[in-house]
Image (cartoon, coloured by chain):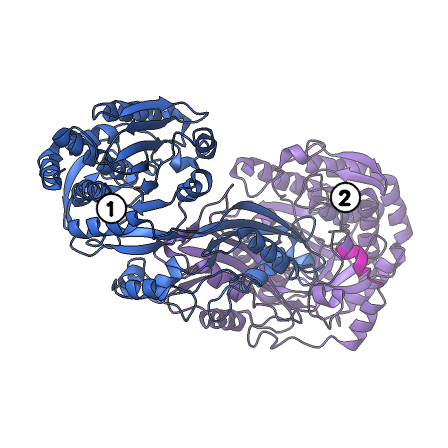
Chain colours: A purple, B blue
């Protein structure tokens, strides 16, 4: 097939592609809010119809939650599974938006044109880059360059409760040679990245109970143990002076960074000052002997995500509270074992709680890190295809966050995933005034056309 | 005058005295809630009328807030100023009360009869012990044993905003030889206490700002400084391993306990196990080398009264918050200087805040400790009078809390205060089902009769 013809068609079709994306963006498919249940279904139905229009055998699949969309189309090359999600985050606080979040528009900014709407970047715009690439092949050649299974979810923004059961029940139908996921970002404005490492995540909630009821700090202060004192003392020791996590055994299973990958990362010219400066910081806060890129991609972390105890309203109350609590999460890498770390953390906390206090724990999820095997030839082919489209050479990168679907594809379907996306770091996903660069949308479509061509 | 006759009259009059207290308790004088403004005024008017009925020249004095009640009556002995407050705390949560908080009743309990109502103990019942003692003198002898000024406030439970201006404006009228304050408790059920030490109070609010906005702990975790980490690290170091406060200079001005007072305290047989056991604790949490009684009466403390940061709702959110804050209070003793400690605390915090974070402070009140000079002969006379009434010998005791009015009498009126009260530790003041023991009310009236007789 001629890729040039497909790319030319993509260029000519951009206004129509944008209008199709606007149709999808106008559907307020907020998955977490039951008030938008019908909208979620409408978004799924819109996608089924759109896939059908490009020759895909697509159908809506009911789940206990919002429906899945599954579509199949034959093609010459290998079999790929493409994943995206059509649901979006809530839009509150609405007053911080400059326009109706479900009335998309092109806006001119100092960094170029953007598509402004909830879901423009996360993930409707990204999902449609792939669909539009397929549409161009269908229009130009009447067939696809690969055998493709489309798989769209409507619950990603609300914890994907139906995903794992659906994968189990439909494992055979969803088999492919490799999964493609479009829900990540560019390395920087000009450089695409293929994510090959995702950190795992372990969540813990701790509650320290001291006295049986709130006390007056005048009557009891000095004699009664204050659970906030206990909690701050423990959590204040969670990192040592070098920024390392103090929980025993925490670094078991953390691999040394592969020298070839380290050298590639060093060549990326990551601008740590700009990265931290963008959020008002200047000094990396992690392990002293690691670069900022290592700190966010290849090193494990401990963060206190929330803490609460006593009186926190206006003014002052001399209360000595009965309890205090905190939420702590760990990002995991390599082969760190989330369950072993959970137990080690709990033992470490228990050892520091005075006899007079009780501690209770509540676990919140435990997923190991994912490391993709880049030996699959698709990785290098995709890297070259991306490099041909973008100003910068595409890189294998890490991602500090956790994208559970990639892990589920591996463990349930036995399939590696290639995560490629075109979001910019200033896309305001999950926040007011979400946007997607028109350039991301346009080059993203062209990127997938090049990748599909390269894979065949 | 014959005290025996006055005491006999008090015994005979107890049912009528209880009914008078009930009249006052039925007035819902909640000072903090504007809906009860008229009720507060009614309570003041009731007191003016009641004082007039026993020969006191009493009047209601308007303030920008709730009115004061001031009354004068001549008498043979020294001039005393008696202070109490007629306002009460809100009653919520109402569903935890076993009866209407403003429908007082006598109830039989396993520890004897109690008067159940909001304000029964704090402070209407206590205030009326003094008024009823005066009534008995008036009825029996037609005159008072001392020259008495009555001074009742209606804003004590809402921060006393009008108190200081009123004291300044009426300083001459309110002059007396000594102030008597009935707003404290018995040392134990059988032993009355005269408070000679009140701890001071210093409140500080700290906010640590890290990044300019909340961050995703996946994208930034490891590289961005988390303000909760900074805050817990600082507050976790507020006490050393021996329970001492780590702020430099904190113990400047903390006196050694007078050996005579220490020996008297040792003789009180304070039951630390019962004190802590009543709130589910067993081990004193203060300085290792101090007894629990010292820890709450004569030693300074630091308590974290509240802490907040990040996500604290249900479930989990992998947020790396922009800010975290805490409220910290210090109880002060001896001649500790609240302003010097405030500055030392702030310097100590600032020195621990990483360059990338900002800290802001907000001060909440700073009052030094009050130490009464027990050289005034009234103290020893009152002690003997109380010892004659109660099973246990009265003691000079400390109080861990802060009673600002005593400090204001000292600084504005130049007058020492003698704090004597008859509340029990289980009176549930500020809580549902507040009560006052009938025995406290009865012996309290008799105690004041004995004290007034002893002072003349």
Q: Secondary structure at mark 2?
A: strand
Q: Secondary structure at mark 1?
A: loop
Which residue, given by chain and number where applicable, does mark 1 sit on? B422
Chain of residue at mark 2? A
In the image, B59 versus A41, the foreground residue is B59
Q: Is residue A273 magenta?
A: yes
Q: Main secondary structure of the magenta part?
A: helix
In the image, B134 versus B308, the foreground residue is B134
Which residue, given by chain and number where applicable, does mark 2 sit on? A436
Give the answer, above or below, for where B390 lies relative to B65: below
User: Crowding at label 2, few (<14), some or many (≥20) Cα neighbours within 10 Å?
Assistant: many
The image shows residue A393 at horizontal and vertical percentages of: 87, 61
* The magenta segment: A269-276
**Can I make out residue A397 in this image?**
yes
Give the answer, above or below, for where A220 lies relative to A441: below
The image shows residue A341 at horizontal and vertical percentages of: 54, 71
The image shows residue B98 at horizontal and vertical percentages of: 23, 39
Of the residues tagged 1 and 2, which is closer to the observer?
1
Give the alpha-carbon distance from disc 1 to disc 2, as whole Å. Answer: 71 Å
User: From the viewer's perspective, is B7 left or right of B49?
Assistant: left
- Residue A375 picture quarter: bottom right
In which quadrant is the N terminus of chain B drawn?
top left
Give the answer, above or below, for where B73 lies relative to A277: above
User: From the viewer's perspective, is B193 left or right of A456?
Assistant: left
In the image, A242 versus B69, the foreground residue is B69
User: From the viewer's perspective, is A112 left or right of B213?
Assistant: right
Q: Is residue A427 magenta?
A: no
Question: Contact (CB < 8 A) between labels 1 and 2?
Answer: no
């Amino acid at each position: 097939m001629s890729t040039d013809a497909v790319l030319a068609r993509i260029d000519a079709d951009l206004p129509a592609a944008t209008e199709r994306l606007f149709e999808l963006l106008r559907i307020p498919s907020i998955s977490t809010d039951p008030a938008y249940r019908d909208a979620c279904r409408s978004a799924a139905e819109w996608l089924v119809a759109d896939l059908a229009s490009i020759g895909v055998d697509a159908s809506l699949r009911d789940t206990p939650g919002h429906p899945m969309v599954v579509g199949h189309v034959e093609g010459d090359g290998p079999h790929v599974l493409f994943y995206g999600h059509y649901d979006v985050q809530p839009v509150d606080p609405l007053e911080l938006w400059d326009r109706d979040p479900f009335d998309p528009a092109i806006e001119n900014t100092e960094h170029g044109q953007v598509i402004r709407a909830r879901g423009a970047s996360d993930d409707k715009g990204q999902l449609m880059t792939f669909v539009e690439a397929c549409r161009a092949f269908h229009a130009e050649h009447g067939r696809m360059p690969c055998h493709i299974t489309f798989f769209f979810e409507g619950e990603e923004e609300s914890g994907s409760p139906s995903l794992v059961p659906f994968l189990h029940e439909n494992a055979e139908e969803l088999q492919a040679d490799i999964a493609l996921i479009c829900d990540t970002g560019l390395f920087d404005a000009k450089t695409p990245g293929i994510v090959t490492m995702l950190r795992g995540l372990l969540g813990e909630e701790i509650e320290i109970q001291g006295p049986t009821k709130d006390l007056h700090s005048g009557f009891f202060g000095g004699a009664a143990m204050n659970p906030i004192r206990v909690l701050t003392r423990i959590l204040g020791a969670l990192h040592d002076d070098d920024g390392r996590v103090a929980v025993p055994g925490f670094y078991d299973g953390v691999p040394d960074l592969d020298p070839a990958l380290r050298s590639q990362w060093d060549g990326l010219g990551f601008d740590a000052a700009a990265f931290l400066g963008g959020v008002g910081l200047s000094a990396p806060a992690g392990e002293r002997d690691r670069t900022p890129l290592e700190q966010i991609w290849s090193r494990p972390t401990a963060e206190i995500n929330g803490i609460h105890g006593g009186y926190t309203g206006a003014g002052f109350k001399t209360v000595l509270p009965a309890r205090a609590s905190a939420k702590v999460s760990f990002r995991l890498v390599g082969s760190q074992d989330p369950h072993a770390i959970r137990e080690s953390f709990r033992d470490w906390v228990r050892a520091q709680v005075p006899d007079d206090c009780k501690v209770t724990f509540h676990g919140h999820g435990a997923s190991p890190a994912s490391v993709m095997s880049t030996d699959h030839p698709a990785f290098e082919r995709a890297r070259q295809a991306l490099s041909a489209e973008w100003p910068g050479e595409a890189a294998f990168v890490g991602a500090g966050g956790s994208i559970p679907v990639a892990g589920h594809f591996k463990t349930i379907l036995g399939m590696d995933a290639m995560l490629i996306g075109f979001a910019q770091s200033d896309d305001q996903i999950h926040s007011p005034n979400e946007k997607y660069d028109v350039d991301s949308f346009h080059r993203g479509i062209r990127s997938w056309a090049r990748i599909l061509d390269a894979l065949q």
